[in-house]
Amino acid sequence: MKSKKLSFYGILVAIIIIAPFVFPSFSTQLATLWLMIIVAMTWDMTGGQMGYNSLGNIFFYGTGMYVAAVITIAIPFDVGEYNNAFGGGIYKFTDTQYFLGVFLGILGAGLFCSICAVLIGFVTFGLRGPYFAIGTLGVAIAAGELVSNWEWIGGGQGISLPVFPYDLDLGKTFFYFLYAVTGVSLFVFLKWLYSTRFGAAINAIRDDEEKAEAMGIHTLRYKLTTWSMSAFFIGVVGGISAFQLIHFEPLETAYQTINLGIFMVVCVLLGGKGTLWGPIIGAIVFHVFKEVTWNYLLGWQWVALGALIVITVVYFKDGIMGGLMRSKPEWFNSDAENRAQAGADS
Amino acid sequence: MDQILSNISLLFEFPVVNLKIVIDGIMIGALFALAAYGLALVWGVMNVKNLAQGDFVIAGGYVAWWFAKQGLPPLLGVPLAFVIMWGVGWLIYKLVISRVIERDLFTSLLATFGIAIMMAQILNLMFGSDTQSIDLGYDSFYFFDGFIDIPVAKLIGVLMATALAAAVIIFMKSSRMGQAIRATSQDARAARVLGINTEKVYAFTFSLNSAICGAAGAIIVMVWIIQPFYGITHSIRAFVIVTAAGLGNLPGVIAAGLGIGALEQYGAHIFGIGYQQAVAVMLLLMVLIFRLVQQRKVRKSLE
């Protein structure tokens, strides 16, 4: 059993590594797929495992983008002047400045977002159920508006970052692996986290918060820690996509409340809430569905997205993983933890 | 920043500006209160939080706008929007809402969010993304040397909103269906035991809500502007009002609606019109935090 599992993960890692070389024309697509997988997994940390359904996690994505961009620009230049010139040809980044910016920017984005999560969480975690969802949605919408009126960081026009200094195909592979490393480390981290006492505690908060508190779990501390960990990873992918996209603007790209902000929720619901593999499977299915159908719908894609949300929510209550656990329980026998979660969800 | 300060000082130098802002705010707030009342109705009766509320409003506005463009008298758009949005609400209830009533609140929230996205996009595809309004062509009353103008169209709008609200209240108080709705909101199971067809009550309530929103939207298009994507702001406003006022508190909903209208006009005056949505959201967060502090007090007294 053990060796079977090991070889499964080995094959998976091999696929992840060779994928961009086998399908070089799809490497940007695959990078976007990683982005979806990572945001879905981070949403599931609070939404699925802890029972706090946030609609505003996109706040951390947008903030991550801006923090990464500001750090990169601030190392060699003055941020306000740079954005006034709109990144024009006057400002040239050396290779060292670029890669230093990428490294520090992405790290700084993650850290800044975790701090933001703690600060926002102090206010919003007092809200329960749908109030939490609406409150966090409000934070994300307000942040988008405020940033788009803040001239120092480019206002409504957004920020332009330097282009990857070497060959562009190499750049695509570089960003793919940045995402892939983040995604794999997030997966390993979550697999470990959900097996610890911490994972049990946040599941207890989901199942009955009052009882969890009565059992001596400091619920607010657990909630803040979980959300700030999830915010760290969203901030990191936000930072990576800032460099990947080169130019971004506040309302449509960074704080895209109804695109990515709602996609991540749909991915998790589609795959199955509160499971380790659910968000990943959901993200893959959703992304493939979206990319295959999007171009043929001619403006109706958003209607189709709304319909997909409604259908997922109304008819696929437990998602793909939840359905599989119910219909094929023998597949999950080796994983007692998953079985317990399926029981808790139904 | 200087702009903001000068805007604030303007309020103190010319107190009459305050009056204008408050009157404008109250006139538009009456319409917010109408949509919020519908939200409170659905929330209280079937425990569904409808995030598509604002999109019902906008859809009603487009119905009225479309009929006015076909040459019908604009005021006729209000009853037409009421009837058509009734049908839309009934359809949405049968297709989606009836399947999520018994489920947890986040499910209905997300389902209505999906409906909101769909409706906004369908309106966008049908009517384009330009802002639209109907010009009734009436004059304005002027006071204080023309400092304050009250357009007749807005007065008509407020009167119609008041009439609609009064009609709904009388209906809820005295009719058989109104009694059934109130009974269901108190205890759905007991109502079922006593022979009330709660399924019918739910369908009726949701359609009524959608129709009220539609009529509100038909008035909004006459006194203000509509655009396919303005729906979410209206939804957030409705949530602010209901959260601030509490469920089943009709005078509270009206007062909060008028207050939100006035506060938003102040926000638009001080920070500029670009922050309108942000002001609505900030008000929501402030109300939520205030409620939180209030609840904490209750908890402490229990210790």
Image: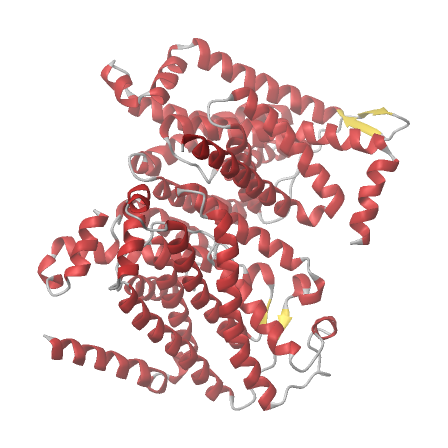
Quarter of the image for the N terminus of chain A: give it. bottom left
The correct choice, above or below, for A31 with respect to B204 in the image is: below
Identify the residue at image location x=30%, y=72%.
A188
- How does the figure colour the protein chain or chains? secondary structure
The correct choice, above or below, for A311 with respect to B180 in the image is: below
Front-lying residue, B49 or B5: B5
Kindly tell me whether residue A238 is visible in this rendering: no
The correct choice, above or below, for B109 with respect to B220 in the image is: below
Identify the residue at image location x=59%, y=56%.
A144
Number of numbered markers = 0
Identify the residue at image location x=68%, y=36%.
B263
Front-lying residue, A196 or B66: A196
Residue at the front extreme of this rendering: B303
Is B169 positioned to the left or the right of B260 in the image?
A: left
Q: Position of residue A46 (x, y in %)?
A: 37, 55
Q: Position of residue A19 (x, y in %)?
A: 32, 82
Kindly tell me whether residue A24 is visible in this rendering: yes
Q: Position of residue A63 (x, y in %)?
A: 55, 63
Front-lying residue, B241 or A251: B241
Q: Position of residue A230 (x, y in %)?
A: 41, 62
